[in-house]
Amino acid sequence: MSGEPEHVTKLRAVYAHWNDTKGASAEAWLDLMADDVAMRSLPDGNHEMSFTKGRDGKAQAAAYFAGLVEDWELIHFTPAEFIASGDRVVVLSRVAFRFRKTGKVAESPKADVFRFRDGLIVECAEFFDTAGAFAATRPDA
């Protein structure tokens, strides 16, 4: 969109690609990340979401995405708002993933917080309904 910060334009394109490909490739994300990127996630590697442990560096970021798609199938990832201030962008979205082992779907609002340096992501933190995600990992009794 014209007039929006460059960081937002880049993120819009990556989110659209991520949704359109149903998470089939993380290359667009990795291309937008600095070599020293730091990734954090609310579950922090707990329970059936070990891929969410803190990650430092692009190679570890790639491992995050590999773990995500190994365990979860992306149904939709729909960004609603991009809020930019200086080198930071917050993206508010609605997401749904299916846990492959149980077939259960976790749908949630999601907030991603980014910090950019020299046009690349250097920090990324994600926040979502962990209770709903953990519930999707548990088989029915």
Image (tube, helix red, strand yellow):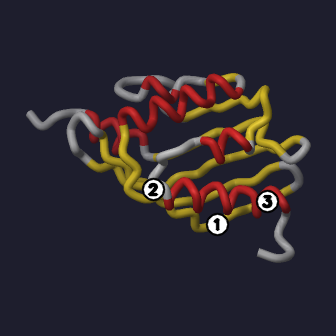
Left or right of 9: which side holds 86?
right
* Quadrant assignment, res 35: top right
Taking the view exactly as shown, the residue that stands out farthest to the left is 141
Circle 2: residue type:
Val
Q: Mark 1 points at which residue?
A: 81
Q: Name the residue under label 3.
A: 84
Residue plotted at (43% across, 38% down): 69
Q: Where is residue 6 in the image (x, y as percent from the top left)?
A: 84, 60
Say whether marks 2 and 3 touch (CB < 8 Å).
no
| Distance Cα–Cα, label 2 vs label 1 | 13 Å
User: Would you place residue 7 above or below residue 73 in this image?
Assistant: below
Residue plotted at (71% across, 24% down): 57
| Distance Cα–Cα, label 2 vs label 3 | 21 Å
Q: Where is residue 17 in the image (x, y as percent from the top left)?
A: 58, 58
User: Would you place residue 91 above or below residue 138 in this image?
Assistant: below
**Closer to the N terminus: mark 2 or mark 1?**
1
Say whether marks 2 and 1 touch (CB < 8 Å).
no
Dot 3 falls on a residue whose secondary structure is strand
Pick the front one: 113 or 28: 28
| Distance Cα–Cα, label 1 vs label 3 | 10 Å
Circle 1: residue type:
Glu
Dot 1 falls on a residue whose secondary structure is strand
Q: Mark 2 points at which residue?
A: 95
- Tell me the quarter of the image containing the C terminus: top left
Residue plotted at (86% across, 49% down): 87
Dot 2 falls on a residue whose secondary structure is strand
